[in-house]
Structure formats: C-alpha cells, structure tokens
Image: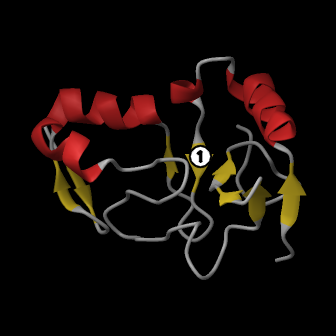
Amino acid sequence: MSLVVLTKEQFYEQGEKLFGKNRRDWVFCCEWCKFEQSFNSIKKQLNEKGFIKSMRYGIITEKNLDELQPKPDQECLSENCNYVSYGLIGSGLEVDDNRYLMLKGMTKLNKCDAS
C-alpha cells in the first residue's frame, strides 16, 4: 500500500463529512482485521460490560482507562489484533507526521466500507 499524505485540515474535513464534528463519534477501521471502533464505542462497551478484552492491553476497565490511554484512532483495540498504525508498518495514511487508522468510509484508501 502506498502512503497517502493529507493535511490535518483535509483529514478533519473528511472526518466531519463522514461522522460530524464530534471526533469521539469518528469510526476508525483497522487495516489488518477490519475491526471498527470510535472513542464513544469504547466508552459504550465499558458502560455495558464493565470491561474490554484487548489483545494489545489485556483487560481495559474504567479504572485503568486513564492510565492506559488507548488511542482508537491509532491502534486496534480488538481482542484478536494488536495493530498499531504509528508503528514500523504504517496504516497508509499520514497526517502531519502522525499516523492514523483509516476512517471508516475512506474506501479509496482502504477496504473498509462506508455502510
């Protein structure tokens, strides 16, 4: 995959177009396992189940959430994948020297559907 470079303004414009102004609602799609997550989906799962099983962090709870500071825009938090987009292998999207998972719906950049 070739690297796609966007300005922060272009990235934020695309995110707002897809999900609105609240960045906690922006859904990111893991390059490897296609797991979809947003900050709000993580909080919702914590509220419903009390924890999240994550391959990267183990068990995430409300208590250790602030300590761990997971980044749903930069790392997969699924229980079957520990992909990190700012690691040695990037996600293919770079925004002003920061790497992000793909926004769901950016189908020209990856295989995640907008549906």
Residue reaching furthest to the front: 97
In the displayed structure, would residue 20 be above or below residue 79?
Answer: above
Q: Is 101 left or right of 95, judged from the image as shown?
A: left
Q: Bin the neighbour count of mark 1 within 10 Å (Cα to Cα): few under 14, some 14-19, many 20 and up.
A: many
Residue at screen point 31% across, 28% down: 44
Where does the image place residue 11, in percent across and percent down from the top left? 79, 40
* Number of numbered markers: 1
Residue 10 position by quadrant: top right
Residue at screen point 16% across, 43% down: 51
Where does the image place residue 46, in percent across and percent down from the top left? 22, 35
Residue at screen point 83% across, 29% down: 13
Residue at screen point 62% across, 56% down: 101
What's the image's color scheme?
A: secondary structure
Q: Is 107 left or right of 19, judged from the image as shown?
A: right
In the displayed structure, would residue 64 be above or below residue 108?
Answer: above
Q: Which residue is mark 1?
A: 28
Q: Give the SS element for disc 1.
A: strand
Where does the image place residue 64, in percent across and percent down from the top left? 15, 45
Residue nearest the observer in this picture, 15 or 80:
15
Residue 22 position by quadrant: top right
Residue nearest the observer in this picture, 81 or 61:
61
Quadrant of the image containing the N terminus: bottom right
Where does the image place residue 83, in percent across and percent down from the top left? 49, 71
Residue reaching furthest to the bottom: 88
In the displayed structure, would residue 10 be above or below residue 86?
Answer: above
Quadrant of the image containing the C terminus: top right
The amino acid at mark 1 is Phe
